[in-house]
Image (spheres, rainbow, N blue to C red):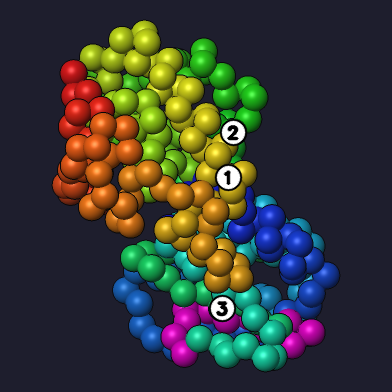
Amino acid sequence: MIELPEAITLGKQFQKTLVGKIVTDVYNATSLHKFAFFNGDPQGYKELLVGKVVQSAEGYGIFVDIHFNDGITLSLFDGINAKYGDASSKVPDKYQLLLTFNDNTYLAFTVAMYGGMYAYKGEFENKYYHLSVESLSPLSKKFDEAYFDSKLAQEKKNISAKAFLATEQRIPGIGNGVAQDILFNAGIHPKRKIFTLTDADRSALFHSLKETLQAMTSLGGRETETDLFGNKGGYQTILSKNTYKLPCPKCGGSISKEAYLGGSVYYCRHCQKLE
Ligand SMILES: [Zn+2]
């Protein structure tokens, strides 16, 4: 799933790889996916995109935008995997959208659990898109401890730390994936109610949020995700589907896994305090 570190990484890779290329053709899905979302009828994407030149690309929050001339944008959202290839590499059999370019390269999009590929001219009306683009990024300097505290203070006191971090896009780009290590590094249980956080806990959560996201982003995303060229990210997750059977790296105890608020949470009962 695209979360902030992957959005930024993919945005940079698109920018470096695609700028100046002209779209020569657009192919629609080769297989039906119930949770692949488009802006209107994807059959219309060909007319919208063919002949357009990539001008820039950028990732923010849980979206990556590819901008073309003539005010056209393709916004990719959440569970999208992008694969780039040239004439020597095989186009995947199953894809949800495929663009070809004038230098015989292609960009194929597949969808994991769910994801969006929204092509449009001008503005895109989508709540999560606006949150991603317009909210202060947790990587920015302006996202400081005072700002973080004010975000916390706006919330209902009985929501949990995971709900605060990873639902509703209160903080753009944080989802179920990156939240695991943020909570682990802060020593806070995913189900911990935010009203029980002490000043020291709040501060630990703020610093963990900044530092964990910065590490994930600097290393090109998490190793649980792949980039435009099919390479895994360079950040090794502490807690994820890849690691939860290993002992806790702090105390050596076992890691717990349970379903909670749309996705599995992984945590150490000993190192992440519930109250
Ligand atoms: Zn532990």
Please state which amino acid type lies under the numbered disc 3.
Answer: Ala
Q: Is residue 13 above or below residue 206?
A: below
Q: Earlier in the sequence, mark 3 or mark 1?
A: 3
Residue 60 within the segment the image draws in magenta = no
The extreme top residue here reads: 199
Q: Quadrant of the C terminus?
A: top left
What residue is disc 2 on? 139
Looking at the image, can residue 53 be seen?
A: yes
Q: Amino acid at mark 1?
A: Thr
Q: Residue at x 37, y 10 (%)?
A: 200
- At x 46%, y 74%, the residue is 110
Residue 63 coordinates in the image, percent (x, y): 54, 53
Check disc 2 and give the amino acid type. Leu
Above/below status of 162 relative to 101: above
Position of 245 compared to 240: left or right? Answer: left
Q: CA distance from mark 1 to mark 2?
A: 9 Å
Numbered disc 1: secondary structure: helix
Q: Residues within 10 Å of mark 2 (few under 14, many from 20)?
A: some
Q: Which region shows up in magenta?
A: 93-104
Q: Which residue is mark 3?
A: 108
Q: Secondary structure at mark 3?
A: strand
Read off the residue under disc 1. Answer: 217
Residue 227 or 117: which is nearer the viewer?
Answer: 227
Give the CA distance from mark 2 to mark 3.
29 Å
Locate the N terminus by quadrant. bottom left
Relative to 165, does residue 24 appear above or below in the rendering? below
Q: Residues within 10 Å of mark 3 (few under 14, many from 20)?
A: many
Rendered location of residue 51, percent (x, y): 77, 80
Residue at 69% over, 63% down: 14
Nearer the viewer's eye, disc 3 or disc 1?
A: 1
Are discs 1 and 2 less than 8 Å apart at CB? yes
Label 1 environment density (alpha carbons within 10 Å; few <14, some 14–19, many ≥20): many
